[in-house]
Image (spheres, rainbow, N blue to C red):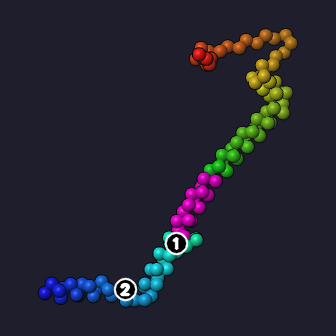
Amino acid sequence: MKSLKFKTIWKNLKRPFKNMFLLIGVGFLIWMLFFDANSWLIHKELNKEIDQLEEKKSFYRDAIQTDQEEWRELQTDEGLEEYGREHFFLKQPNEDIFIIEFQDSINKKS
């Protein structure tokens, strides 16, 4: 009784594997998804790399725009004077400059 049940179950399980088109189709699908040079895994990695490059592209576009705005500011006399005062501590002949440093901004060397 058990062997008859087993044989019918085995026969039903074997039936799809007798179809040659199905076997070739499944094999082709597995090959294309995992083993081919243009496989799904490689496409996934390439899409990830494209996303990273797009992020870098937007970052550099923002940086270029910021630099262009700073460049436009430096084209004016007021912008150039402000930049010189902030970065190089330049002053007018009749001015005095006082540099104030806070205690927590001073580097301590032991």
Q: Is residue 22 visible?
A: yes
**Quadrant where the C terminus lies?**
top right
Query: Mark 1–mark 2 contact, CB under 8 Å?
Result: no
Q: Is residue 80 left or right of residue 45?
A: right
Where disc 2 sits, the SS reads helix
Along the viewing direction, whichever of 35 and 41 lies nearer the viewer: 35
Left or right of 45, for residue 12: left
| Residue 33 image position (x, y, % from top left) | 50, 72
Query: Residue 101: where, in percent of width, then height?
Result: 65, 15
Q: Which residue is found at the position 22% from the left and 87% from the top?
A: 7
Badge 1 crowding class, 10 Å Cα cut-off, few under 14, some 14 to 19, many 20 or more, is some
* Furthest residue in direction left, as rendered: 1
- Which callout, 1 or 2, points to the residue nearer the camera? 1
Residue at x 52%, y 65% (from the top left corner):
41
Specify the label residue 35 is tagged with.
Answer: 1
- Residue drawn at point x = 42 percent, y = 85 percent: 22
Give the residue type that dot 2 points to: Phe
CA distance separating discs 1 and 2: 22 Å
Residue at image position (85%, 10%) is 94
Q: Residue furthest front?
A: 110
Image spot of residue 75 (x, y percent): 84, 33
Residue 50 lies in the magenta stretch: yes
Q: Is residue 82 visible?
A: no
Secondary structure character of the magenta stretch overall? helix
Residue 5's mark?
Answer: none
Q: Which mark is residue 17?
A: 2
Hey, what amino acid is under mark 1?
Answer: Phe
Q: Which residues are magenta?
A: 39-53
